[in-house]
Image: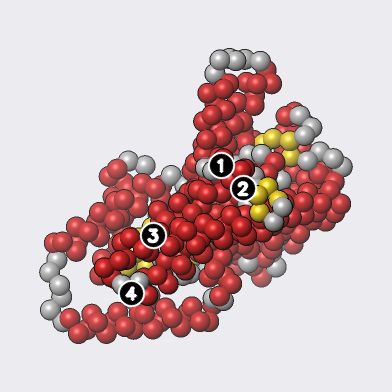
Amino acid sequence: MSTDKNRATAAAILPLVGGPDNITSIAHCMTRLRIGLRDRSLVQDEALRALPAVMGAVDDDTYQIVLGPGTVARVTPEFEALVEEARAAAPRPAHAVTSDELAAQGAALKETRKAQNSTPFKLFLRRVANIFVPLIPALIGCGVIAGLNGVLTNAGWLPAVVPALAAMASGFMSLIAVFVGYNTAKEFGGTAILGGAVAAIIVFPGVANITAFGLELKPGQGGVLGALAAALLAVYVEKWCRRWVPAALDVLVTPTLTVLVSGLVTIFGLMFIAGEASTAIGTFANWLLATGGAFAGLILGGLFLPLVMVGLHQALIPIHTTLIEQSGYTVLLPILAMAGAGQVGAAIAVYYRLPRNRSLRTTIKSALPAGFLGVGEPLIYGVSLPLGRPFVTACVGGAAGGAFIGLFNQLGSAFGSTAIGPSGWALFPLLDGKSGMGTTIAIYAGGLAVGYLVGFVATYFFGFTRQMLTDLNTDPEPAGAPHPAPATEPALA
């Protein structure tokens, strides 16, 4: 998408979310533009979803507009620029009281929705996800380089380049605890660099010289979980200091006490506790797939699409990262990726079951390439979720693919992904396992095939009632009429 198209998309979105004065924050993840709103009632949902570049929208803690990978990273800066330009060009409205009233109304509506639809646990998971989401690009890049390095090593090619690639692939992972600590403190309202400083203790080689309670520490012990806990503790210590330390001494005393107190607790407590927790996560994941692989894969593959739908799949990032730290790959991601395969199979079945619905078939054709590459949101919000039953049958396909891969894990062919983020066909370069690359690729490809097939069959035969076929298997538009956006087809209402 060109810069002009990116700006045009941003310009089209801005008035439909209430204009610049209705926006309190702007951010983006891999696929979604996330906007904080003063007044949710000003958003024109139907018109927004009708924009060609918009694949869907999710009303959560922030208002999330699904634009897809790549596109969202290009549209967001243009959107931010337009908001700033509009605010700079337009004077403050003459009716300041009315604006305040609207802001208060929007805040009240937001708090009401939070109380109704959010629990403290879910809110905490979202904040944890916010810590790890910014790290995903580095995890992907380093994971791909690690895979390339493995291929070169096994083939004996370019031996002079292999050490350089190993350094590139491992450098970030060796210091990931520091980045986690930095982001944790920032997310929970502390000084980010202090969170990073405390988390850096975990990866400092000198901790190997420390003995506590008769046990020797190891650099990296506790990993990202320890870094998260250490930085969170640092936030609370810092906030306590801000309340009680005199202002004249704050700049000297607060950072010193924050690092000192949090550092001591980390060294003589959190590293041991988090280390045991990390080991338990790895042990449990391996045990789960080794003993109940097929059943575990069925459950994980079948439930992942609903997690994606509500955005809580990102809460799994710390678990994936912990597994990658321990064994070099996460065994869970290939199983969870089967949910996307079930989604693809279901969409293809919808395509063939509704031959007269040109609009919906156009949506499917445009969304399938992204679906094969593991980006499921266009198909979720544009096809299966609005239709209802096909979303359930897509989950059935994901469960079947997950069971297939879980079974081979149970039989001893354990493998995983060296990074998180991609799935579908995009996961092939990141695969690694104990049974050799050929076997690993074959099993993963087999799982995809099972997910496609079962998702297709389940949707073709059970994804529609007779009334749905009667209502949907017609062309909702007159000949020659322009097709609306994928997520708001009239046939999907």
Q: In this view, does 479 lie above or below 168?
A: below
Q: In which quarter of the image is residue 190?
A: bottom left
Q: Position of residue 387 (x, y in %)?
A: 60, 65
Q: Give the numbered dot on residue 210.
A: 2
Please name the residue that numbered disc 3 is placed on: 255
* Left or right of 90 on screen, residue 229: right
Q: Give the numbered dot on residue 38.
A: 4
Of 420 and 209, which appears nearest the observer? 209
**Which of disc 3 and disc 1 is earlier in sequence?**
1
The crowd level at tag 3 (other Cα within 10 Å; few <14, some 14-19, many 20+) is some
Residue type (three-letter) at the residue carrying disc 1? Gly
**Which of disc 4 and disc 2 is earlier in sequence?**
4
Q: Where is residue 130 in the image (x, y as percent from the top left)?
A: 48, 59
Residue type (three-letter) at the residue carrying disc 2? Ile
The crowd level at tag 1 (other Cα within 10 Å; few <14, some 14-19, many 20+) is few
Residue type (three-letter) at the residue carrying disc 3? Pro
Q: SS of the residue at dot 3? A: helix
Residue appearing at x 30%, y 58% in the figure: 12
- Tell which tag, 3 or 4, sits nearer the viewer: 3
Q: Do the residues labelled 1 and 2 touch (CB within 8 Å)?
A: yes
- Distance from Cα at disc 3 to Cα at disc 4: 35 Å
Can residue 377 be seen here? no
